[in-house]
């Protein structure tokens, strides 16, 4: 099945080819960087009640842009940070990407904006919750402080399959060289990053 994904306003549209075989399922990351990113793009309300960001690991080569490529914006929280894409039109988080890995952490909102409840119906429960040391309040009991065995069991087979089958490219988020993002990344300065950190009120001393 090919699944349709889109930003909230619909200007950016894409497809995920063979969605079941191209994705790992639902995961939540509570880390300060994921929280900072949603604050930075002005969508902190998309964080869950514990400050978690949900992603669906997806093979980059399974993602096809259908419309609105020019709406994409790229942010890095540091010069070596992940490439985090969102839309300019309606500030929808799109995906985070790692160079050299068959990984696009696609935002589940992209599915649900097209069809409410799509993610729950097609992906079931969240299978992995990581970096709970940055979570607010009481995250679900199965969350790992950093990353546990359960989380490795969740993601390792996906990454291995992607590496063996060469699913990291072509990636629509990078030029043909596989290295250059299609939009010039904005690298956030340390000062700005510190300001955002204050907003996320990550417990002091836990960074
Ligand atoms: Zn939009
Ligand atoms: Zn994170």
Image (cartoon, rainbow, N blue to C red):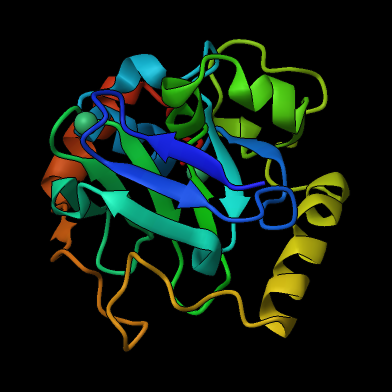
Of all residues shown, which one is farthest toward the bottom? 177
> Percent x, y for residue 104?
50, 57
Number of marks in picture: 0
Q: Is residue 33 above or below residue 57?
A: above
Query: Toward the viewer: 16 or 97?
Result: 16
Report the front residue among 81 and 157: 157
Which of 153/32 is in front?
Answer: 153
88 sits to left or right of 151? left
Give left or right: position of 199 versus 138.
left
Residue 45 sits in which quadrant?
top left
Q: Residue at x 65, y 49 (%)?
A: 19
| Coordinates of residue 153 in the picture (x, y in percent) | 86, 54
Side (left or right) of 196 relative to 205: left
- Residue 147 left/right relative to 60: right
The foreground one among 151 and 63 is: 63
Residue 22 visible to the viewer? yes
**Occupied quadrant, residue 179:** bottom left
Q: What's the residue at 17%, 62% (across, down)?
A: 185
Q: Position of residue 41 (x, y in %)?
A: 21, 33
Residue 203 seen by the camera: no
């Amino acid at each position: 099945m090919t699944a349709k994904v889109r930003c909230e306003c619909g200007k950016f549209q894409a497809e995920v080819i063979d969605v079941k075989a191209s994705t790992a399922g639902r995961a939540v990351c509570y880390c300060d960087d994921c929280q900072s990113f949603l604050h930075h793009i002005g969508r902190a309300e998309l964080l869950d009640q514990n400050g978690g960001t949900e992603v669906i690991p997806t093979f980059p080569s399974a993602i096809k842009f259908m419309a609105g490529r020019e709406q994409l914006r790229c942010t890095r929280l540091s010069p070596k940070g992940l490439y985090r894409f969102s839309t300019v039109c309606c500030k929808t988080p799109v995906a985070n990407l790692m160079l050299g890995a068959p990984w696009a952490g696609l935002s589940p909102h992209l599915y649900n904006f097209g069809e409410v409840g799509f993610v729950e119906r097609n992906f079931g429960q969240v299978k992995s919750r990581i970096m709970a040391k940055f979570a607010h309040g009481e995250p679900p009991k199965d969350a790992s402080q950093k990353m546990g065995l359960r989380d490795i069991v969740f993601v390792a087979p996906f990454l291995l399959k992607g590496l063996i089958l060469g699913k990291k490219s072509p990636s629509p988020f990078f030029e043909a060289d596989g290295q250059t993002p299609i939009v010039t990344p904005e690298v956030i300065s340390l000062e700005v990053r510190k300001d955002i950190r204050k907003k996320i009120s990550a417990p002091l001393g836990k960074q």
